[in-house]
Image (tube, grey):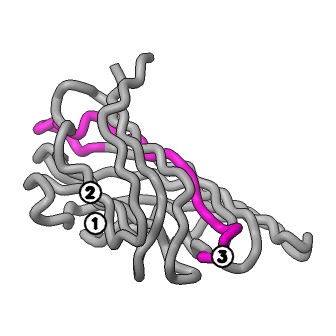
Amino acid sequence: MTMKLLTTNTSSNASASAFTSSIDSTYKVYVFKFYDINAATDGVQFTFQGSTDGGSNYNTAITSTYFASYHYEGDSDADMGYDGGQDLAQGTGYQPLCNDVGNDADQSEAGVLYIFAPSSTTFAKNFIVKSNQCGAGDYTQEQFAAGYFNTTSAINAVNFKMSSGNFDGTIKMYGVA
């Protein structure tokens, strides 16, 4: 498996980070790695959505599932479980990659999103996500999401944003051969 870096978006106090080119049939898998994502607003979600029209609209139907594990700094609580509040069921909103992102200087998020065969015009497009963060409540949290874009149109753009407010950070898009 060879990964080729296609694009890097570095954001500073940005409302969104869109990838509107280079998502085509060249690669069967596209990987987005996000680093040092720091929210301007405390306790928000870092999210993504795909587009079938080059980024004019980000409202593709998604079905997904989400679970997480966490551990508080003070060792007061730790757990792991399913979080149905982050799922989409044929929803056209943005899919959470990370919930409860903190905005302190020592709070940020990092992770990876895989989108499989986004250019297919026959099948739905599957995705998986794994991310980790220092959350708004001073805890570490690892999140997992998986699902699919329920469309036979090609996904040709992807957008990342916070559920509220702006963010800083770097997102890199790779093609996998």
- Is residue 112 on the magenta stretch? yes
Q: Badge 2 is on which residue?
A: 18
- Measured along the vertical axis of the image, is residue 74 above or below residue 42? above
Answer with the quarter of the image where residue 58 lies.
bottom left
Q: Amino acid at mark 2?
A: Ala
Give the residue furthest to the front: 12
Residue 36 percent across, percent down from the top left: 56, 56
Name the residue rendered at 13%, 37% in the picture: 122
For the residues labelled 1 and 3, the Cα–Cα distance comes to 34 Å
Around disc 3, counting alpha carbons within 10 Å, would you say few (fewer than 14), some (14 to 19), or many (20 or more)? some
At 47% across and 44% down in the image, what residue appears?
33
Q: Which amino acid type is shown beneath numbered disc 3?
A: Asp
The residue wearing badge 3 is 104
Disc 1 to disc 2, C-alpha distance: 22 Å
Locate the N terminus by quadrant: top left
- Residue neighbourhood size for the residue with mark 2, other residues' Cα within 10 Å, grouped as few (<14), some (14–19), many (≥20): some
The location of residue 34, given as percent across then percent down, is 48, 50
User: Mark 1 Cα within 10 Å, few/some/many (few <14, many 20+)?
Assistant: some
Question: Could you say which quadrant of the image residue 121 lies in?
Answer: top left
Q: Main secondary structure of the magenta part?
A: loop
Give the image location of residue 136, x and y in percent.
66, 78
Q: Residue at position x 23%, y 62% from top?
A: 61
Comparing marks 1 and 3, which lies closer to the viewer?
3
- Ranked by sequence position, the earlier of labels 1 and 2 is 2
The amino acid beneath tag 1 is Gln
Side (left or right) of 133 relative to 73 = left
Q: Tell which tag, 2 or 3, sits nearer the viewer.
A: 3
Element type at mark 1 = strand
Q: Is residue 86 magenta?
A: no
- Specify the quadrant of the image occupied by residue 117: top left
Q: Specify start and end residues of the magenta stretch as a single range.
A: 103-125
Q: Which residue is mark 1?
A: 90
